[in-house]
Amino acid sequence: MSQTVYQPQDAKGRDDKANRARMLVSCPDRAGIVAAVSQFLYEQGANIVQSDQYTMDPEGGMFFMRIEFDLQNLEQNLPSLQEDFTRIADRFEMRWSVYRASRKKRLAIFVSKEDHCLLELLWQWQAGDLEADIAMVISNHNDMRALVESFGIPYHHIPVTAETKAEAERQQLELTSGKVDLVILARYMQIVTPKFIERFTNRIINIHHSFLPAFVGGKPYQQAYDRGVKLIGATAHYVTAELDAGPIIEQDVQRVSHRDNVAELKRIGRHIERIVLARAVKWHAEDRLVVYQNKTVAFV
């Protein structure tokens, strides 16, 4: 029997983004930043199609900006634009990046036995709502191989035990280093080491099944039940060496009651988890996030 392999749909196509770029800027706030960046892009022949900015405090705070612009012959002209922009960046002490909108980010999804977050990402990718390429799925279990491979996505089974953790991580790094832009922990029930995190600084997104900073660590639904909470939530965050303490990207909650046992809290929570993680991944893929200290600015 033949197997159907699902492929992603590009709802709007990629042609309209062939000449589009995205610029992210952060710097100390002062007068003239927007004018300088806009004038520079105008002089380069670029057309701004979207611009968002945020200041923490106009008097000595940090300023953040995200600009989308179109530039004819982008692939040819972008390197010189970036080189010329350094004079603006130096003047305003900017940290900045420019990304081509047509270049999809390559994702590696790490998963254990629960499939709800993985499925949401696969469905959004297949529908064309997640503008990224899922390069691979890595799991410490073999349970979801058939599901993942039905989407035409490579599946790598790397068992993890206390004795084999170092070797498992070596294999994971061999598979991902230089080959993916973002790692997603989609209910991957293993702690990643500082060595792995260092390779992907601010490029690992985890979904934690509680409304952080409440109920850090294991069994958060049991913790929530024991505490008698009336709201449960989920948190998508960048991973740092401190457990469940990285910059928060997105959160959501749902009301519960004393009638809900731990199993019911988990059932309700699965829906929150899948939506929160998908939003965070989508925003990262569309270059909508700027990390500053232990926070994110999300231009959504």
Image (cartoon, rainbow, N blue to C red):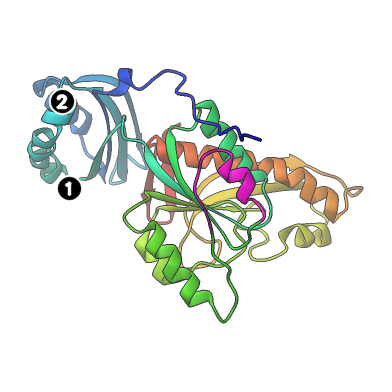
Give the percent coordinates (x, y) of residue 267.
79, 46
Q: Which residue is mark 1?
A: 93
Judged left or right of residue 30, residue 239 is right
Q: Residue furthest right?
A: 259
* Identity of the residue drawn at 54% across and 66% down: 243
Q: Which mark is residue 185?
A: none
Q: Quadrant of residue 140?
A: bottom right
**Front-most of residues 5 and 249:** 5
Give the percent coordinates (x, y) of residue 8.
49, 29
Q: Which residue is mark 2?
A: 41
**Front-most of residues 15 and 255:** 15
Q: Is residue 128 above or below residue 89?
A: above
Judged left or right of residue 256, residue 218 is left
Residue 273 is at least partly visible in this image: no
Give the percent coordinates (x, y) of residue 106.
39, 44
Residue 152 is at least partly visible in this image: yes
Q: Residue furthest front?
A: 1
Question: How would you rate the neighbour count of disc 1 (Cα within 10 Å): few for under 14, some for 14-19, many for 20 or more?
Answer: some
SS state under label 2: helix
